[in-house]
Image (cartoon, grey):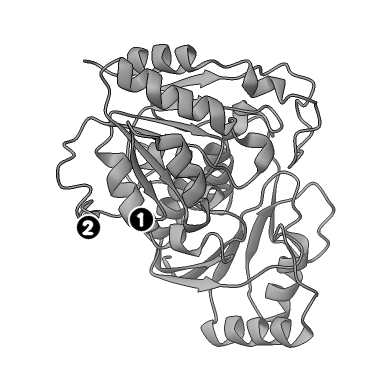
């Protein structure tokens, strides 16, 4: 029997939400309506996912990286909203280091009759489906395995890759982009976690080296990264720092020949539009789980560095050797490997 409404929860960052795409499509194929509960940092990405009918935004105090104090009134309001929605089921998707059980308790209090999640901890009566999984799976496959355990699967013909809603918006921004024809290389120097960012000076040198190799380079970043993108773009790159919404960035990445980016949201957005990625990957989290999924990728960075597996937000090793060991020439060679001239 097809369920009427399923609530899916993924409460962290944009990249994490984009990696839920195959799982969301599996659930959507087996239900009439999908509501996705996202955190403030992931809500815009949630709206890009095929299969999502509505997006709710809620700052979760046990998952948000900069949590506010627990607000009892906020918990009551969310419980009431879920009770009014009356979903037939909920699927709580979490990273391996997050617990689904606090949210499961709230959803159970709201009357949700069937709740599924991956949980290493004993869930008591909070979960109807307690799924267990090999944590070395890529995150997209891990989430899809949860959907299957909950009774949902991809429809015939769905390849299980990341995807975004199409058509995407035009990529023209003011007077700067109309002259750009598809085939440029995007360099995205920023990262939400500082330990995952390639040093700005090396990014700027890479822009120069790519330009010397005959590549047109576009530099992207968020509104708070304009100084960074201006420095990295220099005189030879096109600086679009702060100039794109997430859907516009998706369109920009879609027309690129390759994207040079750290382990941050735009890496997964590039994968979702099918663009090859040069991944400047700090091993503070494992590449097996978090590298760009389903697209040609060249992984750069010392994956055996001392910071491996620490989940550090600030680099714990002087000199940031896992990424300073990558040279601009390495990036140019990686782009050449990915791009058919």
Residue 182, image x, y percentages: 19, 35
- The residue that disc 1 covers is 243
Q: How many marks?
A: 2
* Residue at x 43%, y 51% (from the top left corner): 26
Helix, strand or loop at disc 2? loop
Quarter of the rendering containing residue 230 = top left
Is 185 located above or below residue 177 in the figure?
A: above
Which is nearer the eye, 59 or 331?
331
Which is nearer the eye, 319 or 80?
319
- Visible in this render: residue 299? yes
Helix, strand or loop at disc 1? loop
Q: Does residue 200 appear left or right of residue 257 in this picture?
A: right
Residue 80, image x, y percentages: 63, 87
| Quadrant occupied by the C terminus | top left
Which is nearer the eye, 38 or 52?
38
Quarter of the rendering containing residue 291 = top right
Residue 174: assigned label = 2
Other residues around mark 1 within 10 Å, as few (<14) / some (14–19) / many (≥20) = some
Disc 2/disc 1 C-alpha distance (Å) = 9 Å
Tell me if label 2 and label 1 are in contact, CB under 8 Å. yes
Which is nearer the eye, 250 or 204?
204
| Quadrant occupied by the N terminus | bottom left
* Residue at x 62%, y 61% (from the top left corner): 11
Is 331 located above or below residue 314 in the figure?
A: above
* Residue at x 77%, y 66% (from the top left corner): 102
Other residues around mark 2 within 10 Å, as few (<14) / some (14–19) / many (≥20) = few
Q: Does residue 17 appear left or right of residue 323 in this picture?
A: left
Quarter of the rendering containing residue 82 = bottom right
Residue 42, image x, y percentages: 53, 59
Q: Does residue 177 appear left or right of residue 155 in this picture?
A: left
Mark before the other along the chain sequence, 2 or 1: 2
Residue 294, image x, y percentages: 42, 30
């Amino acid at each position: 029997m097809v369920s009427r409404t399923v609530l899916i929860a993924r409460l962290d960052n944009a990249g994490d939400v984009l990696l839920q795409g195959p799982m969301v499509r599996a659930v959507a194929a087996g239900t009439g309506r999908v509501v996705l509960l996202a955190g403030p940092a992931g809500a815009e990405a949630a709206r890009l996912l095929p299969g999502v009918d509505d997006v709710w935004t809620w700052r979760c105090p046990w998952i948000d990286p900069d949590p506010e104090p627990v607000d009892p009134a906020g918990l009551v309001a969310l419980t009431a909203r879920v009770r009014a929605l009356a979903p037939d089921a909920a699927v709580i998707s979490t990273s391996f280091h997050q617990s689904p059980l606090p949210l499961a308790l709230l959803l159970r209090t709201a009357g949700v009759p069937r709740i599924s999640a991956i949980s290493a901890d004993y869930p008591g009566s909070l979960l109807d489906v307690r799924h267990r999984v090999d944590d070395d799976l890529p995150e997209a496959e891990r989430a899809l395995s949860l959907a299957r355990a909950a009774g949902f699967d991809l429809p015939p013909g769905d390849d299980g890759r990341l995807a975004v809603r199409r058509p995407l918006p035009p990529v023209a921004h003011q007077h700067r982009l109309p002259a750009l024809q598809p085939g440029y290389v995007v360099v995205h120097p920023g990262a939400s976690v500082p330990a995952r960012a390639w040093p700005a000076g090396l990014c700027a040198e890479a822009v120069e080296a790519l330009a010397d190799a005959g590549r047109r380079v576009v530099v992207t970043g968020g509104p708070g990264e304009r100084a960074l993108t201006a420095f990295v773009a220099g005189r030879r790159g096109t600086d679009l720092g702060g100039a794109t919404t997430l859907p516009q960035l998706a369109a920009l990445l879609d027309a690129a020949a390759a994207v040079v980016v750290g382990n941050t949201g735009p890496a997964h957005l590039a994968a979702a539009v099918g663009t090859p990625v040069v991944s400047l990957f700090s091993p503070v989290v494992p590449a097996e789980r978090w590298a760009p999924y389903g697209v040609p990728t060249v992984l750069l960075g010392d994956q055996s560095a001392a910071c491996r597996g620490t989940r550090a937000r600030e680099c714990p090793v002087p000199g940031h050797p896992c990424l300073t060991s990558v040279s601009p020439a390495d990036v140019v060679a990686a782009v050449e490997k990915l791009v058919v001239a």
